[in-house]
Image (cartoon, rainbow, N blue to C red):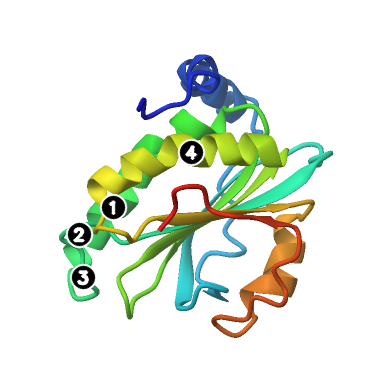
């Protein structure tokens, strides 16, 4: 299986160039307002936002939130050096998704207790969010602990609404999971 689905490949190849253009025009930004915020996820854990990468200008017509979670191999909460290295890698990987059609926002998060990482994205189109996730999962699985990679797409939700309605819900509270799609092949 290819790491990047066939329909995503052409966009993935153009994404770095589009990301540079977004940066030059001031549309690709790193807002600081959410950095340091604590976010509880439905799947459990308390995550701290360490980076926010957003494309500004216009709202998603068909909003969708993508929640991704994983635990890097050789990473544990006590290894601050590994966490700093991962934060640097995040900067390098940004152009490969920030220029994809439909990408709006990503909150990069870390749970200090478990050592897990998570990303909360807003996309314009649940189909685009799902396609991106299906391309990302094989890459994350190669770098992560066995069965630690999971994702969920919340169709019809904006990131702000998701944070308000889902992120603060108690771990395991699935009653609020309306509008979700199951994790295909997820752990």
> Taking the image as drawn, is residue 67 in sight?
no
Question: Nearer the viewer's eye, disc 3 or disc 2?
Answer: 3
Question: Nearer the viewer's eye, disc 3 or disc 1?
Answer: 3
Residue 156 percent coordinates (x, y): 79, 51
For disc 2, the marked residue is: 82
For disc 4, the marked residue is: 134
> Taking the image as drawn, is residue 22 in sight?
yes
Q: Which mark is residue 76?
A: 3
Residue visible at 57% across and 59% down? 32
For disc 1, the marked residue is: 86
Along the line of sight, the residue nearer the viewer: 81 or 102 = 102
For the residues labelled 4 and 2, say whether their Cβ atoms are less than 8 Å apart. Answer: no
For the residues labelled 3 and 2, say whether their Cβ atoms are less than 8 Å apart. Answer: yes
- Lower position in the chain sequence, tag 3 or tag 1: 3
Which quadrant does the C terminus fall into? bottom left
Which quadrant does the N terminus fall into? top left
Residue visible at 51% across and 14% down? 10
Along the line of sight, the residue nearer the viewer: 55 or 155 = 155
Density class for disc 3 (Cα within 10 Å; few <14, some 14-19, many ≥20) is some
Q: Secondary structure at mark 3?
A: loop
Q: CA distance from mark 4 to mark 3?
A: 26 Å
Residue 18 percent coordinates (x, y): 56, 20
Question: Nearer the viewer's eye, disc 4 or disc 2?
Answer: 4
């Amino acid at each position: 299986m290819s790491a990047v689905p066939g329909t995503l490949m052409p966009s993935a190849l153009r994404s770095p160039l589009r990301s540079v253009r977004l940066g030059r025009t001031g549309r690709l930004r790193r807002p600081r307002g959410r950095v340091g915020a604590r976010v509880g996820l439905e799947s459990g854990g308390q995550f701290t936002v360490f980076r926010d990468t957003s494309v500004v200008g216009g709202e998603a017509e068909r909003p969708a939130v993508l929640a991704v979670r994983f635990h890097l191999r050789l990473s544990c909460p006590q290894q601050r050096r590994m966490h700093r290295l991962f934060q640097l890698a995040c900067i390098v990987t940004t152009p490969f998704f920030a220029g994809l059609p439909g990408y709006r926002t990503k909150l990069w998060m870390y749970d200090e207790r478990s050592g897990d990482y998570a990303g909360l994205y807003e996309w314009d189109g649940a189909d685009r969010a799902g396609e991106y996730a299906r391309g990302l999962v094989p890459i994350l699985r190669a770098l992560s602990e066995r069965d630690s990679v999971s994702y969920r797409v919340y169709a019809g939700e904006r990131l702000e609404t998701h944070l308000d309605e889902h992120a603060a819900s108690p771990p395991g509270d699935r009653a609020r999971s309306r509008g979700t799609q199951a994790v295909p092949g997820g752990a």
